[in-house]
Image (tube, rainbow, N blue to C red):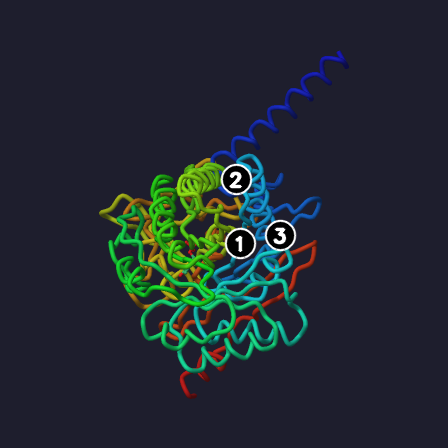
Amino acid sequence: MVKKKKKSLKRRKRRKKQVRKNYKKIWKLGDKEVGTRPFDIDREGKLVVRQGNYQYKIFDLVKRFGTSLEIIFPFIIEERLNEIHEIFAYYLKQNKYKGKFRFHYPMKVNQNKEFVLPIISEGGHIEVGSANELWLIKRLWEQDQFSSRIRVICNGPKTKRYLSLIEELKGKGLEIIPIIENFLELDYLRGYRGDLGVRVDPDLKIKSHWDKRVDQFGFSFQDLLKIGKIRNLKVLHYHASSQIQRLEDLVGSARLVMKYYIKLKKINPSLDTLDIGGGMPVAYEKKKIFSLESAVKGIVKTLKIQAERAGIPHPNMVVEWGRWVVAPAQITIFKILAEKKINRGVAKKWYFVDGSFMNDLLDTWAIKQRWHAIPINHLHAKTFERVWLAGSSCDSDDKYTAGGSYVRLPKRTEVENGDDLYVAFFDTGAYQDALASNHCLLSNPAQLSADSGLITVTRTRETAEDVGKRFGW
Ligand SMILES: *Cc1c(COP(=O)(O)O)cnc(C)c1O
């Protein structure tokens, strides 16, 4: 009898474990390929994030710090950058590739200190796009937080202030590489004593939100060849697009620009580096896209083959895959405040949240960004509501409809213990913060960082006074 009982207990335990696994699958958590590996559900049906043996209980943090709330996980940035370094190292070795690899973090993707410092600590280099971003680097440099091995690539319009800051930092011994984007900048920078780069506009059609054939940045290839020799020219740079949808576009743009590189190298023998910019996509919708391995493998191979055919050394390689490294390192959490029936629509209810899509997740509005949105509590729910989420501003555009579809969330009224229901948006670490605004004078979310078991408040919730000040009150 006793034995039998034990057996059934075991079976029940096993079944429970299976059920938990299924919930993980339903909410697409714990899946490395879509970037949710550290995320799990605890016994109470609540979201946890694991860093080794540390764990962060998101619901508890929300109770302590309130919503709307952003939580940064710097360890995710470190893991992802390490993955890039490891995979490049592997394919360089496998292909007997002689050039070096460097990752440069494009600061515009997220300039918060909690994002930039982990990159530097893991051996990443920096790309800046403005004088103000470079000024932050100067601050780090002056505080001795920066090794002189680090390299800084400077894109963006070279204003007087920007140019003098470049000269100043170069003079202090920082390895700083301005990228020339037009004839005016060429005039300014011809006398520069350090390494220089030029940017080319590759004139390619690429499947992404930004599918324009030409953009305003960089020289056309014809113009580039007309310039002739540039002293100290080291880097040929391009940035084809962001969130590139097809592997062939990412590899194909490298293949195309490598042809330019070979021609440019004949005129400028000092040229030794190809900087392929950003573009590696994030699995925002938690559907598998092409893998990092396949991208790296394709790029290394194509550069190697072409360099050898042309009889030139393998170029050093730079990537600036900012979005891929940092987007998954932040989640944004809102509380569901109220609901309202929708009479005509694929969604049946509005859920009103205590934050704003137009203010805090601006790409929802600007580029119709889709997000992975899941509850942080009641993750074991069995009945669901098809909802659209409404932001707190008075603007009818302040909403998230998952691109005219719907978000599947538990029934608000069925949450246990009379708790509120909370929703987390994943992958909000790229671009949203610097684009954030104060429509209807709403406050932006409070912000925490969770690392090595410690929770740090990195931004307190703005008061009415804080926001008012910005408008002269
Ligand atoms: C924006 C930008 C990037 C980052 O692109 P992601 O697609 O986010 O990786 C890289 N390089 C340059 C020059 C950029 O302007």
Determine if residue 107 is in view.
yes
Along the polypeptide, which appears first: circle 3 or circle 2? 2
Q: Which residue is mark 3?
A: 75
What SS does tag 2 mark?
Answer: loop
Residue 374 in picture, x, y percent from top left: 46, 46
Q: Nearer the viewer, residue 245 or 370?
A: 245
Give the quarter of the image for residue 452: bottom right
Residue 317 in picture, x, y percent from top left: 49, 50
Residue 29 in picture, x, y percent from top left: 52, 39
Q: Which part of the image, by quadrant, shows the C terminus? A: bottom left
Along the polypeptide, which appears first: circle 1 or circle 2? 2
Give the quarter of the image for residue 115: bottom right
Q: Is residue 19 above or below residue 362?
A: above
Q: Residue at x 35, y 50 (%)?
A: 257
Q: Residues within 10 Å of mark 3 (few under 14, many from 20)?
A: some
In-image side of 308 versus 145 (left or right) = left
Q: Which residue is mark 2?
A: 29
Q: Residue at x 58, y 77 (%)?
A: 171
What SS does tag 3 mark?
Answer: helix
- The amino acid sitting under disc 2 is Leu
Which disc is residue 103 wearing?
1
- The amino acid sitting under disc 1 is Phe
Q: Residues within 10 Å of mark 1 (few under 14, many from 20)?
A: many
Q: Residues within 10 Å of mark 2 (few under 14, many from 20)?
A: many
Q: Nearer the viewer, mark 3 or mark 1?
A: 1
Number of numbered labels in the structure image:
3
What SS does tag 1 mark?
Answer: strand
